[in-house]
Image: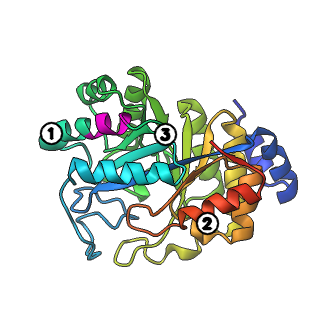
Amino acid sequence: MLDKEELLRLYNLDLEELLNISKMYVKDEVEFCSLINARNGKCSQNCKYCAQSSHYNTEIDSFPLVEIDEVRKSAQDALKNKASRFAIVTSGKTPDESDFDKMLEMIEEINKIDGLKSCASIGILNEEQAKRLSKAGLKRFHHNINTSRTYYPEVCTTHSFEERINTCKLIKKYGMELCCGVILGMGETVEQRIEMAMILAEIEPESIPINILMPIPHTPFESYIDKIDEENILRTLAVIKIANPKSVLRFCGGRMRLSKENQEKALTTCVDGLMVGNYLTTVGAKPDEDIVMVKNLGKKIK
């Protein structure tokens, strides 16, 4: 694994030189995934970026766990939009035990759809929950580190960074694939972005979602629109890819903060996955626009 000094040296190279290095690790195909916001709002955690936290008056609509029929329909729509993976995503620190059996049923329903693999993003897990998800046939679990270990207390204080790391370890222990990424632009330093790349290299996720902060009104980070620019987003993407050459680096929430030109540049030099459609509380590109963009770049959709 590359050390911090070497990754920092790479980060500060001429941008085109850096992107030419990361380009060596990018595949000719782009993996599409999609999600359903299966339970929204009223989260007990105080993550400073999040519209769903009950600590902030963001005025979003809250709703309980959706019905299985809605998940099935959304999953089928995702498949039509070229997604090969589909995730159920719920708010809250941990899965609600009263809903957990229903979540397992959702996973089983997704697995019945030919051409689609099940994913879930349902919070911090204990060992029994990880075991049951594996038994239900969950293919991939999503759980971000969000930022570096040293910066995490500036982002959230109601749970620890190590709780997140432990959930990632449980996923690996029970044979599921891991999707684990970050949110850029929350006030972290360049060195802390390097730390993120190194932590991810230790965890070895199959997929690394990259989110770029979309400041939400009435959250503590509502004014953080200028904490990272497009060039530094590209630099961070490239370094994370170099540090994690076997992982699929995936554009997720906040991608629309990049110009179309820079989105395309990233897809040819350091990114080989896309979350298509809308995200949890922010709007994404239309799926047919992403399909056209990828094909125009001469890449295949996995």
Residue 107 drawn in magenta: yes
Q: Mark 1 sits on what residue?
A: 97
Q: Mark 3 sits on what residue?
A: 179
Tell me, yes or no, whether the two marked residues, 3 and 1, touch with CB atoms within 8 Å: no
Q: Is residue 68 above or below residue 184?
A: above
CA distance for labels 2 and 1: 39 Å
At horizontal 16% and vertical 43% (from top left) the residue drawn is 99
**Looking at the picture, how far across and down is residue 3, in whole percent?**
71, 35
What amino acid does circle 3 point to? Cys
Tell me, yes or no, whether the two marked residues, 3 and 2, touch with CB atoms within 8 Å: no
Label 3 SS: strand
At horizontal 79% and vertical 55% (from top left) the residue drawn is 12
Instruction: Classify 10 Å Cα crowding around label 2: few (below 14), some (14-19), many (20 and above).
Output: few
Q: Mark 2 sits on what residue?
A: 289
Q: Is residue 14 visible to us here?
A: no
- Between marks 2 and 1 in the image, the one whose residue lies nearer the viewer: 2
**Looking at the picture, how far across and down is residue 58, in whole percent?**
29, 75
